[in-house]
Amino acid sequence: MMALKNDGTLYAWGDNAYGQFGDGVPGVHGSPTAILTNVVAVATGDQYTLALKNDGSLWATGDNTYGVLGDGTTTSSTVFQQISNVLGAAQIRARGNFALVLKSDGTLTSWGKMGPQLGLGSGGGFILAPAPIGGINLLGDVPTCSITSPSSPATG
């Protein structure tokens, strides 16, 4: 479980078997533990966590079997690492084994387990680092937009 306080402190508790809390201490956490500060949004997928900080930087931790940490590898991490090639993130979504970012310039970026959900083709394999989804920019005619999935309705 995770909770984000109004002051930007991210707390986690429960099963941290894959290092998805990012505090470097795998295993069960029996009570809420502060794990990261200056956070404005958090998204969790299958055993990994993405955190968006107030400066627009994106951070990831946990199981990286499908490349969801966006660092160009499949090496897992138990501490948060900055995804260096995603700057200016405005919204983040983590689903299963893939991730999406809406950047402040209106462009979309995705990575993880390959499939049509990434907007980068439908072949197999993995996209190990954030890749821009070409041909779409959400600025201009669309005043606001949210990244959605079947479990979260569209807004804006």
Image: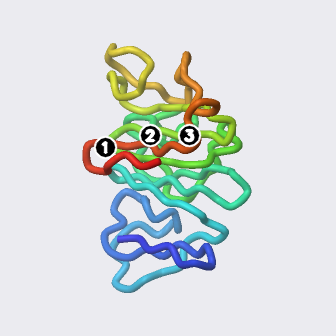
**Vertical position of residue 125 compared to residue 102: above or below:** above
Give the residue pinned by disc 3.
Answer: 102
Distance (Cα) linking label 1 and label 3: 18 Å
> What residue do we see at 40% from left, 55% from top?
44
| Three-letter amino acid code of the residue under disc 1 | Gly
Label 2 sits on what residue type?
A: Ala
Q: Residues within 10 Å of mark 2 (few under 14, many from 20)?
A: many
Secondary structure of the residue carrying numbered label 1: loop
Q: Which residue is mark 2?
A: 99
**Residue 149 seen in the current view:** yes
Q: Which residue is under mark 1? A: 96
- Of residues 23 and 8, the one drawn nearer to the viewer in this rendering: 8
Quarter of the image where one finds residue 88: top right
Disc 1 or disc 3, which is closer to the eye?
Answer: 3
Q: Quadrant of residue 139?
A: top right
Mark 3: which amino acid? Leu
Colour scheme in the image? Answer: rainbow
At 39% across and 14% down in the image, what residue appears? 121
**Image spot of residue 105 (x, y percent):** 69, 36
What residue is drawn where x is 51% and y is 43%? Answer: 145
